[in-house]
Image (cartoon, grey):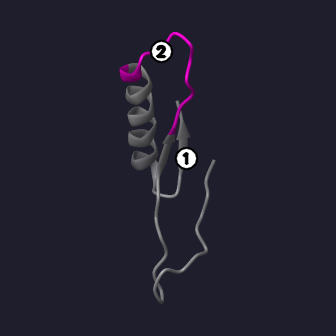
Amino acid sequence: MKISSKIEVMRGTKPIMAFGITEFVEEDDIDELLNRAKYALKEAKKQTYGRIEVA
């Protein structure tokens, strides 16, 4: 999913963001949950900013 920003923070400047999202599974401990979210964020940053990656 690609999301592009049309918001200008300062004249000619748009915010650029990347998100990593994961789901809590009942068997997860906090380390597994955070590792999946970090992985998703890393993958979103690799692609291009303005992406959301789900793991």
Q: Nearer the viewer, residue 43 or 19?
A: 19
Q: Position of residue 6 (x, y in %)?
A: 61, 74
What's under tag 2, amino acid-wise? Asp
Reply yes or no: does residue 3 show up in magenta.
Answer: no
* Residue denoted by label 2: 28
Q: Secondary structure at mark 1?
A: strand
Q: Position of residue 12 (x, y in %)?
A: 48, 86
* Residue denoted by label 1: 52
Q: Residue placed at 44% from the left, 25% from the top? A: 33
Q: Residue placed at 61% from the left, 53% from the top? A: 2
Q: Position of residue 18 (x, y in %)?
A: 47, 52
Q: Is residue 34 left or right of residue 21?
A: left
Image quarter of residue 32? top left
Q: How many marks?
A: 2
Crowding near the residue tagged with mark 2, few <14, some 14–19, many ≥20 C-alpha atoms within 10 Å: few
Q: Nearer the viewer, mark 1 or mark 2?
A: 2
Q: Earlier in the sequence, mark 1 or mark 2?
A: 2
Q: Position of residue 53 (x, y in %)?
A: 53, 41
Q: Nearer the viewer, residue 46 or 27?
A: 27
The residues tagged by marks 1 and 2 sit, at their Cα atoms, a distance apart of: 22 Å
Q: Is residue 42 above or below residue 35?
A: below
Magenta stretch bounds: 21-31
Q: Residue placed at 46% from the left, 54% from the top? A: 48
Q: Is residue 19 above or below residue 38?
A: below
Q: Secondary structure at mark 2?
A: loop
Asked if marks 1 and 2 touch (Cβ < 8 Å), the reply is no
What's under tag 1, amino acid-wise? Ile
Res. 17 mark: none
Seen as rendered, the residue at the extreme bottom is: 11
Q: Is residue 36 above or below residue 40?
A: above
